Image (cartoon, rainbow, N blue to C red):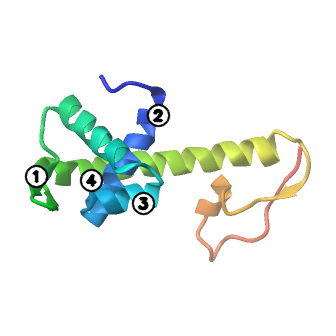
Amino acid sequence: MIPGALFIWDYPRTFQTVARLLSFNRAAEILNYSQSIVSAQIKLLEEEFGVTLFNRLGKRISLTEAGQMLMGYSQKMLDIEQEGTGSVKWETTYAAKGSMKSCSQESPLSRIPRATAGTFFVVK
């Protein structure tokens, strides 16, 4: 099993970054990690799933079939992280305070189609 609670968001983000850039070094720069940390995270993912996620051809890499499958799942995980973070921030900033506040882009109300959305307030 992959160690640490950071797996929930850290490993999918690292995988997505490497997969989109097709570069461990560039992913490390973007994520502000060392290249060895990025490589170690990908290796742990490969060990956890028992598959190779990237074809390594010298300095070039490409996604394997398993890597392509993981792209969709890891993106869903990151989407859930973003949605959860937004909801928690909204709940703790606006709803839990019991005061009248305008709803931000992060609020659940931001899912209402723009044509029907107006200015909404939370009143307790």
Outermost residue, bottom direction?
115
Residue linked to disc 2: 6
Q: Residue at x 55, y 50 (%)?
A: 83
Q: Nearer the viewer, residue 25 or 86?
A: 25
Q: Earlier in the sequence, mark 2 or mark 1?
A: 2
Residue linked to disc 1: 65
Q: Nearer the viewer, mark 1 or mark 3?
A: 3
Locate residue 111: give its quadrant. bottom right
Q: Residue at x 64, y 62 (%)?
A: 110
Residue linked to disc 4: 71
Q: How far apart are the alpha carbons under marks 4 and 2? A: 18 Å
Q: Are marks 4 and 3 in contact (CB under 8 Å)?
A: no
Element under disc 1:
helix
Crowding around mark 1 (Cα neighbors within 10 Å: few <14, some 14 to 19, many 20+) is few
**Vertical side of 72 occupied by 118: above or below:** below
Q: Earlier in the sequence, mark 3 or mark 2?
A: 2
Residue 73 position within the rendered picture, expressed as x and y whole percent measured from the top left: 30, 47
Residue linked to disc 3: 29
Q: Quadrant of the N terminus?
A: top left
Q: Amino acid at mark 4?
A: Met
Q: Amino acid at mark 3?
A: Glu
